[in-house]
């Protein structure tokens, strides 16, 4: 008989700590929430990094010890991550994981295999029941997630085995593909067998008559050292082995995606029904969530902007004083600015891991160009008569820079800092994709769950913070820029 526990009252295991990750889709987030609540029930300190991204990002984060455990699937491990090692079954899979210091739980009780689907009405009209029937309809439009398009056991295997001769499929976010299918923008997409959308959108799952898609049992993947470092928390998580059947997982996915229950609440309800585990801790209210996200967002923007000011100001001065060096500095900072922000975040992961550090580093690099360029331009445009007057007064180069040139150039320099700050506030929302938190977290969750309220929960504070930043620098200008210079036009360059 299941025991009744009250999570906040468990304090006897505070020495154990566990870090959980999850992929960027609803089922993975729910499974991680289940694990978090079970381990918290032992009194362990639990930190979560939800919606980190795709399979490779989570796998790399586990190997780099950025996280301790995350939900994964056996088919994904065999057919994608370890495909080059000839792993064929769960026994050899466990051995391959053990070589890396990893362990895999027993299956949780359901399988989430790939499938192809289309609107049932359209499939019936065209007489399509099996994947092989698609070969007779080359004009059908395919829309697949990027992961499916590139996985060895995804589109490449499907095309090779079935000889599909359709036009090149369109790469789409998995949740967006469902909308495209419902609206008629695409005709065929890949499904996960426990997706709640299959019933909601009345989709026909096409029979995999050549058996391309392998079984894909849900498991937890974790570091072997967790058995020694957090045995009670791990043991609590492993209570889920064999306890989640396909119907239960479908019901939880549906509750989160279409009945608007928060994933944490869905997980709590399952644990209460399955194990009698009662969570008396009140869920975060809107004000509490916005406060927490604001602190996270400010940490990203303030630290990155502060570091950028310290570095970019001297670089801007050097660029103004030495023309050849200035061209090199401006070229280098301009090249950084041309790198797509998401790509720059991903580039930082191998160096700094996941979390706030790579996001701060990427925002720092993005902030350099506006400050360097405006500093150099502000100093270069000081009238020659003023420079000569300062020389005539006998001021040294350092005194001229400190007492004359920087004060005169300050309106233009501040305009550059303000531009960098506003760019930072907007770009920092992408930090949520690598576990940095901030306003991007509710925005991406809202997009995934098609919840406009959640999107606004991140977008509105982000816009307000950008406006506050503009006002803050207007006040700073009153204190730093000499009164006479404030009366002149100060257009940004």
Image (tube, rainbow, N blue to C red):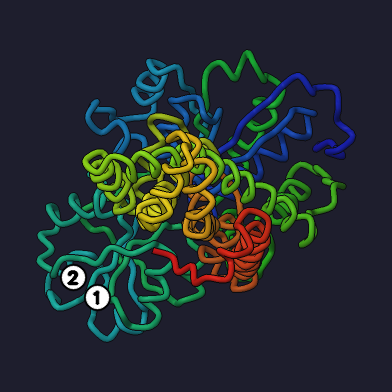
Q: Is residue 21 above or below residue 386?
A: above
Q: Residue at x 18, y 70 (%)?
A: 133
Q: Position of residue 215 (x, y in %)?
A: 37, 44
Callout 2–callout 1 Cβ contact below 8 Å? yes
The circle on residue 134 is 2
Q: Position of residue 353 (x, y in %)?
A: 46, 32
What is the quadrant of the N terminus in the image?
Answer: top right
The residue under label 1 is 128
131 vs 417, nearest the viewer: 417
The residue furthest front is 392
Q: Residue at x 34, y 45 (%)?
A: 320
What is the quadrant of the C terminus in the image?
Answer: bottom left
Judge left or right: residue 141 versus residue 107. left
Q: Position of residue 342 (x, y in %)?
A: 38, 51
Q: Label 2, label 1: how many angstroms apart (C-alpha)?
A: 7 Å
Q: Is residue 13 visible?
A: yes
Q: Nearer the viewer, mark 2 or mark 1?
A: 2
Q: Residue at x 44, y 65 (%)?
A: 492
Q: Is residue 217 visible?
A: no
Q: Position of residue 147 (x, y in %)?
A: 32, 51
């Amino acid at each position: 008989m299941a025991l009744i526990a009250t999570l906040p009252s468990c304090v006897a295991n505070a020495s154990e700590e566990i870090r959980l990750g999850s992929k960027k889709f609803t089922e993975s987030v729910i499974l991680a929430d289940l694990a978090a609540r079970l381990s918290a029930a032992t009194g362990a300190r639990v930190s979560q990094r939800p919606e980190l991204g795709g399979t490779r990002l989570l796998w790399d984060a586990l190997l780099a010890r950025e996280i301790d455990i995350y939900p994964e699937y056996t088919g994904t491990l065999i057919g994608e991550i370890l495909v080059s090692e000839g792993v064929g079954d769960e026994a050899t899979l466990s051995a391959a994981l053990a070589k890396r210091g990893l362990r895999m739980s027993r299956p949780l009780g359901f399988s989430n295999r790939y499938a192809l689907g289309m609107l049932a009405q359209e499939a019936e009209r065209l007489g399509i029941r099996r994947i092989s029937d698609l070969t007779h309809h080359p004009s059908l439009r395919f829309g697949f997630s990027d992961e499916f398009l590139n996985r060895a056991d995804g589109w490449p295997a499907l095309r090779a085995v079935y000889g599909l001769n359709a036009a090149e499929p369109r790469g789409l976010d998995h949740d967006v593909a469902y909308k495209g299918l419902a609206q008629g923008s695409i005709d065929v997409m890949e499904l996960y067998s426990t997706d709640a959308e299959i019933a909601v959108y009345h989709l026909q799952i096409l029979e995999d008559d050549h058996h391309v898609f392998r079984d894909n049992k849900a498991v937890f993947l974790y570091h072997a050292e967790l058995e020694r470092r957090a045995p009670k928390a791990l043991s609590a998580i492993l209570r889920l082995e064999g306890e989640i059947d396909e119907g239960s997982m479908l019901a939880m996915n549906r509750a989160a995606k279409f009945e608007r229950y928060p994933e944490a609440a869905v997980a709590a309800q399952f644990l209460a029904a399955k194990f009698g585990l009662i969570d008396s801790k009140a869920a975060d209210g809107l004000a509490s969530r916005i406060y927490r996200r604001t602190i996270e967002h400010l940490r990203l923007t303030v630290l990155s902007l502060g570091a950028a000011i310290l570095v970019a100001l001297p670089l801007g001065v050097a660029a103004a004083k030495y023309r050849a060096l200035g061209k090199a500095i401006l070229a280098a900072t301009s090249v950084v600015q041309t790198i797509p922000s998401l790509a720059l975040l991903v580039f930082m992961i191998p160096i700094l891991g996941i979390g706030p550090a790579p996001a701060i580093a990427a925002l720092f690099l993005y902030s350099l160009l506006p400050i360097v360029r405006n500093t150099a331009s502000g100093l270069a445009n000081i009238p020659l008569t003023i420079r000569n007057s300062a020389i005539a007064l006998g001021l040294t180069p350092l005194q001229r820079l400190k007492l004359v040139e920087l004060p005169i150039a300050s309106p233009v320099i501040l305009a550059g800092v303000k531009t960098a700050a506003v760019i930072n506030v907007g770009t920092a929302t992408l930090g949520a994709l690598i576990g940095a938190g901030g306003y991007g977290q509710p925005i991406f969750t809202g997009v995934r769950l098609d919840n406009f309220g959640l999107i606004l929960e991140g977008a509105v504070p982000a816009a307000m913070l950008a406006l506050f930043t503009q006002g803050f620098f207007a006040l700073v200008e009153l204190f730093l820029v000499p009164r006479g210079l404030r009366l002149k036009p100060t257009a940004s360059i």
